[in-house]
Amino acid sequence: MPPKLISHLFPCLIFVTLLLLTLYFNLLSHTQPSSPSPPCNLFKGKWVLDPTRQPLYNHTCPFHRNAWNCLKSQRQNMGLINSWKWVPESCTLPRVDPTRFLGLMRNRNIGFVGDSLNENFLVSFLCVLRVADMGAKKWKRKGAWKGAYFPKFNVTVAYHRAVLLAKYKWQPKQSMVGDQGGLKGIHRVDVDIPADDWVNITDFYDVLVFNTGHWWGYDKFPKERPLVFYHAGQPISPPLEMLDGLKLVLENMVSYIQKKFPSKTLKFWRLQSPRHFYGGEWNQNGSCLFNEPLKESQLDLWFDPSNNGVNKEARYLNHLIEEVLRGTEIQRLDLTHLSEFRADAHPAIWLGKKDAVAIWGQDCMHWCLPGVPDTWVDILSELIHYSLETG
């Protein structure tokens, strides 16, 4: 072929090739609709100081619980506490946009079930979302302990207090004959029956966040007032130790959730929120007067169960919980690791009530608000957004 002819044909061949590629990719985009990329591991990362970062709400939020309202209590270092930003290792974690999130959740409801750490979580969520709907009203129905209704979006977000998840009740000692080892009565736990506070919510919530763990200790249920476990109305024999009872409760409650709640309901299980008592338990002058987060190198010393420290229970209980959740549709909300760093962010001695520290000791378990749970809200809202868009 003459060189002159090749030089004329070459641009035509390039044009035809580009045209065919364009047609191919257009066809591909119609046959394979795009979907959002799954989020990276939002639970693994580090805290980075960002002096420009500000909380989305302040002490005037009407949903605050006084003991956690650290701005109102004038806790030291609140500006610094809220200047730390969680940065996942391989992606960015956007801050929740309350208006966008409530728009996504329009005509839907979100429920939290568990102990006071889930209430801590809820209060943060309510105060963040109220930024987008200042007409939010307090809501306590269907057995809820606390909640809010956001009328602009027809969204309800509420917390149901069920510290063991299973039904339990106090039964005082019947006979006054003999000392019976100092026994004053028992707390009967029906491992196969959910607590009344959340038994009637199976069709109400579109998103649910469960937890338990902080009440499963001998400080809450000492030997003179022990937990005694029942199944099918009968005491379990031989009697179970506390953590064996916890495992049985977890198995039964997870089974109940799987059977009774619709499969379309988005279900999360929040793993343990770590405590930061230094120098002793809450009732042994344990303290958390820290000015900055812990270093990564300090975490195992504080929390690895093999070190037998004051705060070892979180990782141990997480192991039990994850074992039971394996193979279910319930998603793990693993906020433990990121929270382990934040020894600086508890109410500590600023409890909003005179003589509270003398009576209860420092609070190194719950979190200041605004504070760390606002990052939990960022992560949960991101996972809800992804799940609803891809569901």
Image (cartoon, rainbow, N blue to C red):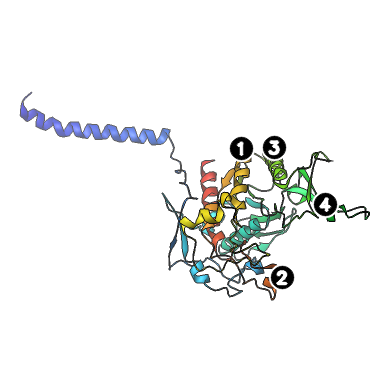
Mark 2–mark 3 contact, CB under 8 Å?
no
Alpha-carbon distance for marks 4 and 1? 33 Å
What amino acid type should be assigned to the residue bearing mark 3? Lys
Q: Looking at the image, is mark 2 or mark 3 nearer the viewer?
A: 2
Q: Which residue is mark 2?
A: 359
Q: Tell me which numbered mark, 2 or 1, is placed earlier along the sequence.
A: 1
Task: Say which quadrant the N terminus sits in.
Answer: top left
SS at badge 4 = strand
Q: Which residue is mark 1?
A: 328
Q: Amino acid at mark 4?
A: Ile
Kind of residue sitting beneath label 2: Ile
The CA distance from mark 3 to mark 4 is: 30 Å
The alpha-carbon separation of the residues under discs 1 and 3 comes to 11 Å
* Location of residue 367 (image quadrant): bottom right
Q: What residue is pinned by disc 4? A: 186
Element assignment for label 2: helix
Measured as percent of width and height from the top left, residue 129 is found at: 58, 60
